[in-house]
Amino acid sequence: MIRNGAGSTTPSSFARLGRRSLTRAFGLNGGSNGQGRHDFQRPQRRDRPPHHEALRPGARQETLREANLLLITEEIFASTEALSRADLSIRTGMTRSTVSRLVDDLLAAGIVCEGSPVVGGTRGRPAVPLTPARRTLVGLGVEVNVDFMAARALDLTGAVLAEEIIWADYRSSDPAAVLVEAGRLALRVADEAARAGARTVGTVLAVPGLVDSDERTLLLAPNLGWKDVDLVALLGRASEAGEGDEGFGSFITAANEAKLAALAVAQELTREEDKEQTFLYVSAQMGIGSAVVVDGVVEAGPHGWGGEIGHVAVEPNGPECGCGSTGCLEVYAGKRALMASAGLPAGVTAEDLYVLTQCSAPESAASTAVEAVERAGWALGVALSAAMNVLDVHDVVLGGEFGPLTDLLRPCIEEELQRRVLASPWTQFSVRQRDTGNAPATTGGALRALRAVVDAPQDWIPAA
Ligand SMILES: [Zn+2]
């Protein structure tokens, strides 16, 4: 391990991305669809390192080199401290000269970078610390939601190089017009990242709805009023007008907003607490989405359609929901429903609602607001207890718009969990809030796009 004062031991916010979370997030096969397609059948757990696989007799030379590149990349990205070539040689069992050749390739590709040499230990040459590269390659995350669209470019260290958000009402909008606008927004953000010296690897679009397992077709987004939309084709149209046509990188894919936001939250929590996280992430935007994260990996089922907690029935005979069913969680705790029952217009923020619950006069308005929040908490508790009884996950992270209301929601949620979860006498429930900032799904999307690099580094190395 190399220690060189403050700078070189950068535990980047992308640290650990080389581990499991990179290999099977979403329970889908993940990664890019275009260039960078790779073998997803490689071992997903660290107990069978890829180089052992490749060292089987008869492994082709190219496969061996690819496996070794992957292993070196994973070690550098998963480490919270800068590693030297000597460290890598010890960790991987490769010779120093093999490690050096592979590191040279990764340097040429802009995947890793070298810090200042450190004289340390008792003998030998100064060690050169290797870390994920700054400002070379970026992933582009884009989100279209009910009341905003956003784009964010993250480099391999997890730093944000550019971002932009537009607030507007996209309910019942024309998907073609909105997606072309989102494409232009994304290209502006990519251009800004390019001016900082970075090249876009690929683009991942987040939407509040069901995305087909082809990772490009939106099947249904009740709150946008969209159905059967080719997201990738429409977003990509923005570049046909010649606006920064390299800007999207070599692939565009799409995924559900809550899963991508959960991916970003899982990475952050894992870094902060230094262990893989298991929790239910609840994303409150205009609708309510969720994701199950087990050991840092977003589990969404074989199609990626799990986590639609917003459409779990709380009262089967309750009010109609935008999905066509009745009594869903969303009609009690979705932003529109919550604001309406608090007597507020849908445009106000959760902070405004919180302030209203705290004021003393006029009393009736305040108590209406408190009742609305309590009812949302009750509905969340009912839906979450159903999820917990099925899933055995008892840690809840509230993200998105719920943030300021968490302290008011928590007792109502916990009361229902205590009553309804069979294992409650033996379980410690945790309901915590995560300040995700605006559009956390764009961060998750950018991270997911960058996986194309860390999962298949050989695809990004320039030809000799
Ligand atoms: Zn519904």
Image (tube, rainbow, N blue to C red):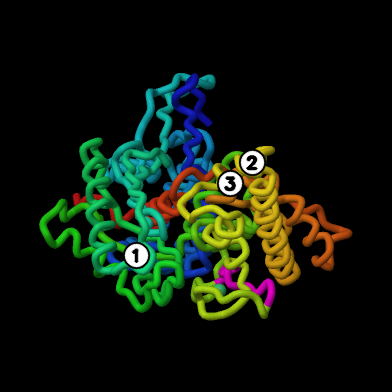
Q: Depth-wise, is mark 2 or mark 3 nearer the camera? A: 3
Instruction: Tell which circle, 2 or 1, labels the residue nearer the N-terminal end.
Output: 1
Q: Main secondary structure of the magenta part?
A: loop
**At numbered mark 2, what does the secondary structure look like: helix, strand or loop?**
helix
Residue 33 position by quadrant: bottom left
Q: Is residue 130 above or below residue 29?
A: above
Residue at the image position 37 percent from the left and 65 percent from the top: 254
Q: Are marks 2 and 3 in contact (CB under 8 Å)?
A: no
What amino acid type is highlighted by mark number 2?
Glu
Residue 69, x across and y down, in percent: 39, 52
Q: Is residue 3 visible?
A: yes
Residue 284, x across and y down, in percent: 55, 56
Label of residue 353 in the image: 3
Residue at the image position 62 percent from the left and 64 percent from the top: 332
Residue 217, x across and y down, in percent: 35, 74
**At numbered mark 3, what does the secondary structure look like: helix, strand or loop?**
helix
Residue 355 position by quadrant: top right
